Every structure is written in C-alpha cells, then in structure tokens.
Image (cartoon, rainbow, N blue to C red):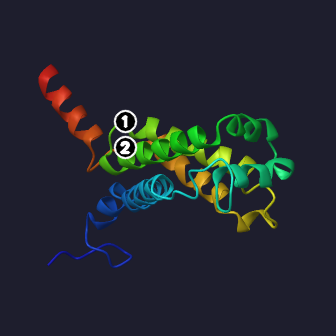
Amino acid sequence: MPAGDAHGTAPGLRERAARYALLPLRVFLGVTFVYAGLDKLTDSAFLSASGNGSIGELMRGVRDTSAAPFLVDWALLSPVGFAVLLAIGEIAVGLGVLAGLLTRIAAVGGALISLSLWLTVSWQVSPYYYGNDLAYLMAWIPLILAGAPYLSLDSLIRSRRSRRTA
C-alpha cells in the first residue's frame, strides 16, 4: 500500500485532482447554458415581443436601470429575434463546453453572454452579489484561461495532431 504524502493522500491523487479540477465547472456551466437555451426556445410566453413573461417586457422593464441601455435598445429592435439568438448562443456555448470542443472560444461566448446579461438584466440587483450573472461571468474565466485539457474533444484533437507530426 502506498505510504501517501504529508497530508495523508495517496501519491498522485493531488495531481489527478488538479488535472480534472475544471471538469465540474465545465459540466455545471455546460448543462446550465444548454438548459437555459432550451428553456427559452420552448417558452412561448418568453418568445413574444410583448405580454406577461415576454422578452420584450423584460427588456423594457430593465432598460432604464441597466448599465448599458444601448444593449437593451439593440435587443428591442427585434425582441423575438434577440431571444432566439440568445437561446441558440447559450445552447452552442453549453454544448461546446460539455464536449470540450473549441472550449476557450465557447467560454468567451459564455462570458460575453453573462457580461451582457449582467450589464442589462441583473445590473439593478442590490447588493451586487445577489445577481447571478456576475458569478457566471467569473466562472467562465478559468475555462477561457485553461480550456479543457482533459476529457475533451480539444485534447483528443491535440493528441492526434501530435501523433501525426511525430
């Protein structure tokens, strides 16, 4: 039986844990964004320019309290088109991060979505830490920096390329 290190862990356990440390974050963000996108696409009330629970009503409701009213004005040019684009973006980002395909690009997309939602929809939340979009924005940063080095299509593609060049 291995002796373990000074902290009582088996040799290599810390290294394996560090290697896969971003995997729970990838799964959480990926599943959450896919779910959010599908939820938007299947909610007929949300996919309306006006009415209770619609994207149009939401955007008009946050316009004057947002940090970036120009973004809200842009969304209000075509609220339903914006909602569909947002939902498709969330699904693409979520699937990319879950599969680990173009992970850094997907994470940048997720960060941009979270940033735009923070600056518009959740900007007026006080205190700021009650709003979830800022936390999502911060959660994307490790994936932007590190990508998905393990258990990902990115790593599979990298290993196949390196075998071809060797």
Pick the front one: 22 or 33: 33
Quick one: quadrant of the N terminus? bottom left
Residue 150 percent across, percent down from the top left:
29, 48
Q: Amino acid at mark 2?
A: Gly
Task: Please tell me which residue lies in front, 148 or 44.
Answer: 44
Left or right: 71 in relation to 156: right
Image quadrant where residue 132 sits: bottom right
Query: Which residue has dot 1 on it?
Result: 102
Question: How far apart are the two marked residues, 1 and 2, measured between alpha carbons?
Answer: 6 Å
| Residue lying farthest to the front in this orientation | 51
Residue holding disc 2:
96
Measuring 47% from the left and 52% from the top, which residue is drawn there? 41
Residue 76 to residue 14: above or below:
above
Query: How would you rate the neighbour count of disc 2 (Cα within 10 Å): few for under 14, some for 14-19, many for 20 or more?
Result: many
Q: Earlier in the sequence, mark 1 or mark 2?
A: 2
In-image side of 49 versus 88 (left or right): right
User: Where does residue 16 sit, x and y in percent of width and height?
Assistant: 29, 60
Whole-percent x and y of residue 108? 52, 38
Q: Which tag is nearer the camera, tag 1 or tag 2?
A: 2
Q: Establish if 6 lies above or below 49.
A: below
- Residue 88 appearing in the image: yes
Q: x, y percentage for residue 10?
A: 26, 72
User: Is residue 21 rendered to the left or right of residue 51?
Assistant: left
> Do labels 1 and 2 touch, CB within 8 Å?
yes
74 to the left or right of 106 = right
Say which residue appears at 52% left-offset and 56% top-offset.
44
State the residue in front, 29 or 76: 76
Disc 2 element: helix
- Disc 1 marks a residue whose amino acid type is Leu
Looking at the rendered structure, which numbered label has been put on residue 146?
none
| Residue at x 50% of width, y 59% of height | 43
Q: Which residue is drawn at the image coordinates 65% and 36% (left, top)? A: 78
